[in-house]
Image: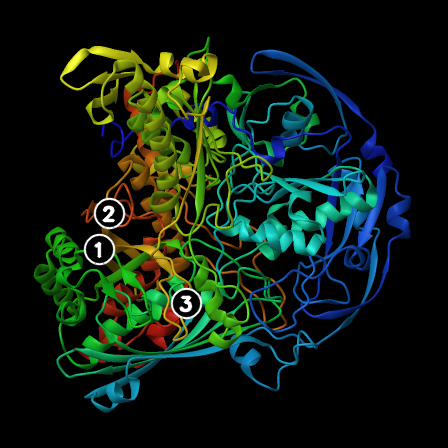
Amino acid sequence: MTYIGKPLKRIEDARLVSGEGTFIDDLSPLPNIHYAAILRSPHAHARIIQIHTEEAEKLSGVIGVVTGKQVAALTRPFPVGVKVPVKYYPIAVEKVRFVGEAVAVVVAKNRYIAEDALSLIKVEYEALTPVVNIEDALSAESSVLHEEVGSNVVNHRIFRYGNIDEAFKNADHVINKKFTFPKVSATPVENYGVIANYTKSEGSYTIWSNFHGPFTLHSVMTAALKVPSNRLRIITPKDIGGSYGIKSGVFPYMVLMGVVSRIVNVPVKWTEDRQEHLMASSSGTDRVTWIEAAVKKDGTILGLKMKYADNVGGYIRAPEPACLYRTHSNSTGAYRIQNVEIEAIAVVTNKSPTGLIRGYGGPQHYFPLERMIQIISNELDLDILEVIKKNLLTKEEFPYQTASGGIYDSGDYHKALNLALESIDYEEFKAKQKEGWKNGKYLGLGFACIVEPSGSNMGYVTLALTPEERAKSLPKSGCSEGATVTIDPQGGITVRISTVPTGQGHETVAAQIVADALGVDPAMIRVVAELDTLTSPWSVASGSYSSRFAPIGSSAVYQAAHKVKRKLLEIAKNHLNTAMDKLVIGDGKVSVKNDPEKSISIKRLVGLAHWNPEGLPNGLEPGIHESAFFTLPAAKSPNELDLVNGSVTYGFVFDAVQVEVDIDTGEVKILNYTTIHDAGSLLNPNIVEGQIMGGLAHGLGAAMYEELAYDERGQFLTGSFMDYLCPTATEIPKVTIKHIETPSPLTPLGAKGLGEGNTMSAPVVIANAVTDALKPFNVSIDQLPLTPDRVWSKIHHQNAVKI
Amino acid sequence: MSIQSLKEKVKISLLVNGREVEGETEPRKLLSDFIREDIGLTGTHVGCEHGVCGSCTVLFNGKAVRSCLMFAVQANGSTIQTVEGLAKDGEQHLLQKLFTECHGLQCGFCTPGILMSSVELLNSGKKPTRREIEEMLSGHLCRCTGYKGVIEAIESACRTNECKGGEN
């Protein structure tokens, strides 16, 4: 392979560094576009008595004001993957259930006028008691958000695998802990944007948006809009300014603006502002986990019980409650634990709704799991590495089936661990740490082992239903993705993909793959990444999420390219009068092995296919236009025992992080962050490095700075970038990245996904390091982010223990 | 001032990327919106409109400013440079080349703003330390890269150019 695996520079960059990128707000695809602004609820929980829009409508330049009742009349509530009857519309109808929920939409000549008009709308509310915290929502006493549900619990499932009672009976120790993970976002620097147009004569909606899938949500949108699927055309712009999952949450606004366009009878454009984005777009769930481990005194973990409750905000919105189940197959992480009980609960509260976010479920899951490894070693007075190694899977155990049905395809976890240890001097650090404690210097070392799932199986989401409920509808499985490779009559190669990149460089990697398959220079290849549901090769699983480009999307490109290659060879075979297996492709031509004089250029072969079909071998179609759809048989639907392989490939991350804690200020300083990755074969090491650093910065933010905070009345407190703190360049520590490569046996190129691992690992590894540093104070970090005041309070509200 | 008087349009003229631009704008229109909507230079991006993310940074009389924190009328008579004005005669600016070289961008949304602040730094003639580059960058949010490639690109530009004055 000439190009795959090489650190090629990205083909996307030239336009992006020149100001020639095309983002949603840069588009003006139709004449007479008008601009929308949204009036939002100031209340966490209230009944809408009346909305007075007359004054707003009178303002010059305003062409219409739309409220929830008008939208509800033309739509149905969005479908969701649970059985409770939550009615979720893209705008409040009778009640508001979180601060920032849409209440009315103004459409005007420009955004300035639309926003002027918002201040002229008067809404009468009757305030209701809010529910803000997970534990309050679990209580039967709490005020109910959705009367038709009758409770704030919207999903509740219990899973038992192996023999959990036996495991707990045989344990020398049982250790219980509770952990809380905060509500964080990923705040792409570009906000949401939608341009919507309703064509009355066709009864069809055309919607441009920086939406990146999953395209399962296309069916959710058509159901809400009550149109056949080919009457909702979604078009994504060439460039999307980051997402990390968050922009999948733009779909309610796509529906809202579609309906608004239909009501006001003009094309409507809406560009979200930052305050709207922080208060009302999407985020990860906050989660409380109660975890219980059954352990032998040598550190062997016999069994785990985990009860966790996710806060999905004011409405349960597709694909939630999938956050509860995304890590289900790898719920025992990197360890050999076959007895597991999981109780998964989703609650609604008066906070903003949640959805996909980098790491989806992983940060929430590994925070308690990997904290427990350290706690077990402390309680048993064992070295933490001894506990890790005792339970860590060995390479001989692959492919490994987890208790809950995950099938880890390949790995060498001990090799990764050893590589990390080579990078830090463990014994020397421990000596330095002891010395430091005597002198008021608090150094800590944390570890984390993360199995990084990638390429989600569509079926895992249906774990929210019982096997009996699932049996009533068709099974869901697979992870399909499509791609098309075309060669035009003059030899121009075009690749069309449906993975909707948001900055991950899919165009570059697709070009590398096709260049290798067809033996041409990647610079000759044009990749079209903008998706159009009427013309692109897409399927239900298409889109950008679960790190699926490397294992799935790239495989579809590979297959389509090889279909084209086969066709070229078929044509060449006739002309060169030889057998297929004697032919090689490269340098822009097909030649006969060991007889390079006999060759024919690709341009000529393509010319034949287009200009002279008469000369084609019998049965061969004219033209060069091949699509391929790829899935993996490993992505099966969940079975009646609730066993599921939720992802197709599983990478590995081992982190070792050193910190220093200032006990007078509570400030945590990261001295060194070492991270070892195994993502199978790497397709482009340059892009890999960038993905890892980006994912790590997100994990660092959740660990140290970021939280979408609410007060006890549900009032939102972090509506600007001065309140919601994202890491900047000065906060990024020194990071050492190393790789091992155990290729996936499942994917054609041996690749696995990556880029989410450190988002999952950083919160817990930093918490472990801080706990380790503060050992003399007997402090255990069970909550994030590690703001100085939180750390200081932990230290000073407990009695110091002498070393 | 009443809303009405705020809506009375004002004539302004400015030099943008070396080209004379004349326009009529409401006094309340942000410079960022004027650049994007009235001049059609959509390379300048808007990410927060409260001066933190830095995406809308342009050079205003040679100084890096947040165009979302200025009104267009304040730019009357000024010289503005945006990302579209960086390449000269079809040749990319050194920083543009190095951002690609060092993988200093992913989605590219924050990149134009970062490039403009980096141009200011490069033009200043200072020889910044890595820490100083990080301090400069702390006025920009990038959620894709973790800043590593960005810092390397700017460091490398400063080295290559010896910070003598930002010529291509």
Amino acid residing under circle 1 = Ser
Q: What is the CA distance from the residue labelled 3 to the residue labelled 1?
A: 21 Å
Residue A659 lies, in percent from the top left, at 25, 59
Rendered location of residue A610, percent (x, y): 46, 16
Residue wearing tag 2: A680
User: Is residue A712 in sight in this rendering?
Assistant: yes
User: Could you classify mark 2 by the number of other residues whose Cα lies within 10 Å: few (under 14), some (14-19), or many (20 or more)?
Assistant: many
Sequence-earlier tag: 2 or 1:
1
Front disc: 3 or 1: 3
Q: Quadrant of the N terminus of chain A?
A: top left
* Quadrant of the drawing holding the C terminus of chain A: bottom left
Asked whether the beta carbons under mark 2 and mark 3 sit within 8 Å of each other, the answer is no
Chain to which the residue tagged by mark 2 belongs? A
**Decide: marks 2, 1 in contact (CB < 8 A)?**
yes
Residue A64, disc = none
- Between residues A634 and A41, which one lies in front from this camera angle? A634
Residue A774 locus on image (x, y percent):
26, 70
Is residue B126 placed above or below A802 in the rendered structure?
A: above
Horizontally, residue B70 falls left or right of residue A30, namely left
The residue indicated by pointer 1 is A410
Mark sitting on residue A638: 3
10 Å neighbourhood of mark 1: few (<14), some, or many (≥20)?
many
Q: Earlier in the sequence, mark 2 or mark 3?
A: 3
